[in-house]
Image (cartoon, rainbow, N blue to C red):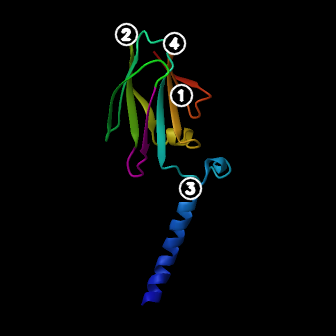
Amino acid sequence: MPYNNFRTLTPLLCMLMLASCISQTPVSYAKSVDNLVIRFRYKVHIINGLPDNAKPLEISCHSNDDDLGHHTLWKAQEFRFKFGIHFWKKTHFVCNFSWGSKSLNDITVFVNEVETRTCRETGNCFWKVETDGIYFSNNDQNWEKRFNW
């Protein structure tokens, strides 16, 4: 009887070991095995890229499960949060931004299937608020304008 239990568990143990190896692939190898890498944890960064401290950037972020609160960011300050993605339901974070008389509400800063593709390589999604709008990057280097004030 113990022999039959071992034969039943062997394929399961092999799959678990393989999944463990794949999920721990170093980032330096991510490009070569891009189709195999599964990332479970992400970090969202929101950066105040405004030119001065005359008016601070006010943000509040939440998901269906978590309220991340209200935050005041002064020039060059950053608010960041990290989380694990859900496989059986959508992971979706939205933020409200206000700067002086300008505001943008319900801006999606992370949602499965969009940011999991664009932020997979680094595990980071960067959002920078500038005087003309909000920009996105997955590496804090190359910025793409996503929203206008």
How packed mark 3 is, by other alpha carbons closer than 10 Å (few <14, some 14-19, many 20 or more), is few
Separation (CA) of disc 1 from disc 3: 26 Å
Q: Which residue is drawn at the image coordinates 47% and 77% (left, top)?
A: 9
Badge 3 or badge 2: first in the primary sequence = 3
For the C terminus, give its image quadrant.
top left
Q: Amino acid at mark 3?
A: Gln
Q: Give the amino acid type for the residue marked by disc 4 in the picture.
A: Pro
User: Where 7 falls versus 13 (above or below)?
Assistant: below
Q: What amino acid type should be assigned to the residue bearing mark 1?
A: Phe
Q: Quadrant of residue 67?
A: top left
Q: Tell me the crowding category of disc 2: few under 14, some 14 to 19, or many 20 or more residues within 10 angstroms, Cα based.
A: few
Q: Report helix, strand or loop for mark 2.
A: loop
Kindly tell me whether residue 71 is visible in this rendering.
yes
Which residue is found at the position 44% from the left and 12% from the top? 53
> Relative to 65, is 74 above or below?
above
Magenta part of the chain: 78-90
Q: Is residue 132 in the magenta section?
A: no
Q: Quadrant of the N terminus?
A: bottom left
Q: Is residue 81 magenta?
A: yes
Query: Label 4, label 3: how many angstroms apart (C-alpha)?
Result: 40 Å
Q: Earlier in the sequence, mark 4 or mark 3?
A: 3
**Circle number at residue 24:** 3
Find residue 60 and report its horizontal and vertical position in percent.
35, 27
Circle 1 residue: 136
Q: Which comes before the other along the chain, label 2 or label 1? A: 2
The disc, 2 or 4, on the residue closer to the chain's N-terminal end is: 4
Of badges 4 and 1, the one in the foreground is 4
Per the image, the residue denoted by label 4 is 51
Mark 4 or mark 1: whose residue is earlier in sequence: 4
Query: Residue beneath label 2, please?
Result: 101
Alpha-carbon distance for marks 2 and 4? 16 Å
